[in-house]
Image: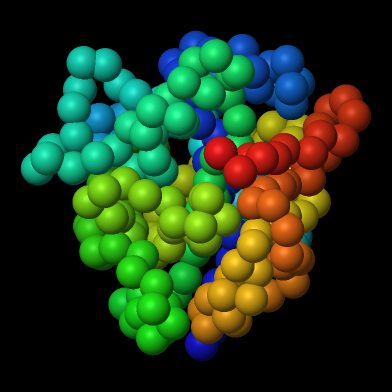
Amino acid sequence: MTAARIDHLVIGADTLAQGAAWSRKTLGAEPNPGGQHPLMGTHNQLMRIATVDFPCAYLEIIAHNPPAQPQDGRARWFDLDQPAVKSALRDEGPRLIHWVVKVPDLRTAVDAWAKLGIDRGEIVEASRMTPRGLLQWQITIRRDGQRLLDGCLPTLIQWGETHPAHSLPESGVTLRGAGVRHPQAALLAKAFEAIGLESLAVKEGPANLCAALNTPGEPVRLQSKGL
């Protein structure tokens, strides 16, 4: 299969205002306005973190969008409705909770994972209007909203003609690398291999998704710490 690439890092926040304050303090950069996700009852802010090695990478700060609710009886994606996640984001502040990987053929990738016994969820077509035009994509979403494997197994996405990172301004923040640690490291390694996701460290141990970033100040290491 054609290689998959890291698309974006997901920073969960109790509110977008809280997320923006975290970004200024932790990364030394202001996030850009994003948009709303009517299907999921969430909204976001975005920041370009692309490099030569990660050419389309960006960071997404995401939060509930009150009073909007998910449609069709869904749970919000990325476990944002789970009590442990909600309380941690409210009481401890924003943190890295998940990541999304871009693939050239979403159906092929989903089928490859199904052969490993991984149910990444249904393929959903989504879109949102931005000041730069309509963004369209296909993404894997489970109705229960679960990230799977403590957030270490990525959500999969296939973009239409337009990618959000292309129109985001330079932020001064760039992605140096990412890795995962998990008790089921062997399964994660097989899952990454099945979709052509390479050059990503996978180690056995307590669940943790981590990402190393260069910022206008000191380098920053983000961690999910098993949330």
Kindly tell me whether residue 153 is visible in this rendering: yes
Q: Is residue 127 above or below residue 40?
A: below
Which residue is found at the position 19% from the left and 34% from the top?
Answer: 70
Which residue is found at the position 37% from the left and 34% from the top?
Answer: 82
Locate residue 157 relative to residue 38 in the image: left or right.
Answer: right
The quadrant where residue 80 appears: top left
**Percent x, y for residue 12?**
50, 31
Q: Is residue 61 above or below residue 5?
A: above
Viewer-nearest residue: 42 or 207: 207
Name the quarter where the C terminus is drawn.
Answer: top right
**Percent x, y for residue 8?**
55, 49
What colour scheme does the image use? rainbow
Which residue is found at the position 39% from the left and 40% from the top?
Answer: 79
Q: How many discs appear?
A: 0
Which residue is found at the position 80% from the left and 51% from the top?
Answer: 176
Locate residue 104 relative to residue 73 in the image: left or right.
Answer: right
**Percent x, y for residue 127?**
26, 47
Residue extending furthest toward the left = 72
Kindly tell me whether residue 189 is visible in this rendering: no
Residue extending furthest toward the right = 218
Viewer-nearest residue: 84 or 132: 84
Q: Is residue 21 above or below residue 127?
A: above
Locate residue 118 relative to residue 90 in the image: left or right.
Answer: left
**Percent x, y for residue 206?**
69, 52
The quadrant where residue 129 appears: top left
